[in-house]
């Protein structure tokens, strides 16, 4: 679901070339869900091998990351660990949404409405343990660092981004900013167009600088966390009814301290149903002091045979197409080796 503060966040478009040589922490689950929901056939069916195993995520991992690595980026994929207990609310809502989408998909299938089949098929996305394990395996074979977070992946990525040598977090969601990532990059994709309700729109990579954002809004990070809680997070999906992004910003600037902000809306919180009621202090602490760990970032060696074993042998990907991607990686490896040799002369 992700936090929606788009209306109050300014962003700057960037080019792939701006990220050459940079180490980026990718929100793995967010990225894998993108692949699973968008890499589909016209009728909404995901890519599958001959045995019916879904392979959309593996295709996305290969083609996107070969392209990003070829641009000189260094990638770290951060996977979610055990979610906080409060996150069961959003998981429950996601299940309800999938159940409804499944009904709509079957109805569209009956009437052979391809457009609706695609729309509702995208909403049936589910990431299994097997998919996660195989994704990690393929990423490491591609020479990409894989980190298993103890808790929220976005929180761990934000923490790593505050360490020396890591440039930015990569995610479509804004939560990384609330967790304190100094920089967030969105739209780091191969596609230059995105399908919307009104048609296709052009998409370019964009960067959001947390310190610039806070200066522009005239608030601090604690107040940004308060805005998130007011409009709704994965821990309190409904937020407070009739308080949108701009109204939340107004309340935060008017009252200042978190205690005063939530005292001002206490009656509205008390009016929430038992299901939607929340303790703002608990949620605030989950963003301000999340569960994270120290990690040494190291990049594994490229493993061409492993890549082919996963994609060609296990799942029947076209060997010719995979070989073309491996050629690109091979050229990249040679360029790095040559660069290392040049340092000695």
Image: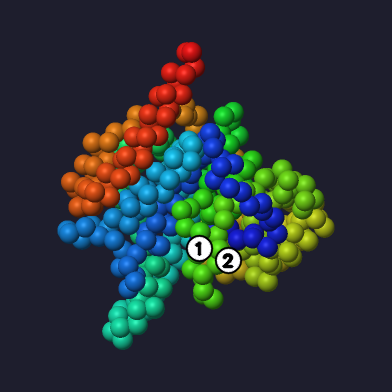
Q: Secondary structure at mark 1?
A: strand
Depth check: give the residue in front, 309 or 162. Answer: 309
- Which residue: 67% across, 45% down? 209
Residue 38 appears in view: yes
Badge nearest the viewer, 2 or 1:
1
Residue 257 visible in rendering: no
User: Residue under circle 1?
Assistant: 193
Q: Which residue is mark 2?
A: 238
Quadrant housing residue 329: top left
**Residue at the extreme right of the image, as rendered:** 254
Judge from the rendering whether residue 299 lies leftward or rightward of residue 254; answer left or right.
left
Q: Nearer the viewer, residue 303 or 148?
A: 303
User: Which residue is rendered at x = 60% and y = 61% of the image?
Assistant: 4
Label 2 neighbour load within 10 Å: few <14, some 14-19, many 20+: some
Query: Which of these two is toward me, 32 or 337?
Result: 337
Measuring from the top left, give residue 39's x and y in whole percent.
37, 61
Q: Position of residue 40 (x, y in %)?
A: 34, 64
Residue 109 position by quadrant: bottom left
The reply to whether callout 2 and callout 1 are in contact (CB within 8 Å) is no
Separation of marks 2 and 1 at Cα, in angstroms: 30 Å
Q: Position of residue 143 (x, y in %)?
A: 37, 34
Q: Residue at x 36, y 40 (%)?
A: 328
Q: Closer to the N terminus: mark 2 or mark 1?
A: 1
- Most distant residue in the front direction: 345
Considering only vertical position in the picture, is 33 above or below 62? below
- In this view, which residue lies farthest toward the bottom? 111
């Amino acid at each position: 679901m992700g936090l929606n503060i788009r209306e109050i966040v300014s962003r700057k478009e960037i080019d792939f070339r701006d990220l050459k040589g940079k180490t980026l922490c990718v929100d793995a689950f967010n990225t894998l869900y993108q692949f699973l929901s968008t890499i589909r056939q016209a009728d909404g069916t995901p890519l599958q091998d001959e045995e019916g195993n879904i392979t959309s995520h593996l295709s996305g991992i290969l083609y996107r990351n070969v392209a990003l690595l070829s641009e000189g980026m260094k990638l770290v994929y951060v996977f979610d660990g055990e979610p906080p207990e409060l996150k069961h609310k959003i998981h429950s809502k996601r299940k309800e949404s999938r159940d409804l989408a499944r009904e709509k998909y079957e109805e569209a299938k009956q009437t052979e409405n391809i457009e609706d089949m695609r729309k509702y098929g995208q909403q049936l996305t589910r990431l299994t343990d097997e998919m996660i394990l195989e994704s990690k395996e393929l990423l490491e074979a591609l020479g990409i660092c894989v980190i298993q977070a103890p808790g929220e992946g976005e929180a761990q990525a934000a923490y790593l981004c505050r360490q020396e040598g890591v440039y930015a977090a990569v995610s479509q969601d804004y939560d990384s900013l609330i967790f304190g990532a100094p920089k967030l990059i969105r739209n780091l994709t191969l596609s230059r167009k995105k399908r919307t309700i009104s048609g296709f729109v052009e998409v370019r990579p964009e960067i959001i600088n947390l310190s610039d954002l806070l200066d522009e809004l005239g608030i601090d990070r604690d107040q940004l966390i308060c805005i998130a809680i007011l409009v709704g997070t994965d821990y309190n999906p409904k937020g407070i009814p009739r308080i949108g992004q701009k109204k939340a910003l107004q309340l935060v600037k008017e009252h200042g301290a978190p205690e005063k902000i939530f005292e001002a809306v206490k009656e509205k919180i008390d009016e929430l149903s038992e299901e939607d009621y929340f303790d703002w202090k608990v949620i605030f602490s989950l963003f301000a002091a999340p569960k994270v760990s120290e990690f040494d970032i190291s990049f594994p060696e490229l493993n061409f045979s492993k890549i082919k074993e996963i994609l060609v042998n296990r799942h029947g990907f076209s060997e010719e197409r995979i070989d073309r991607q491996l050629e690109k990686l091979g050229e990249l490896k040679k360029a790095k080796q040559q660069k290392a040799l040049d340092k000695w002369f």
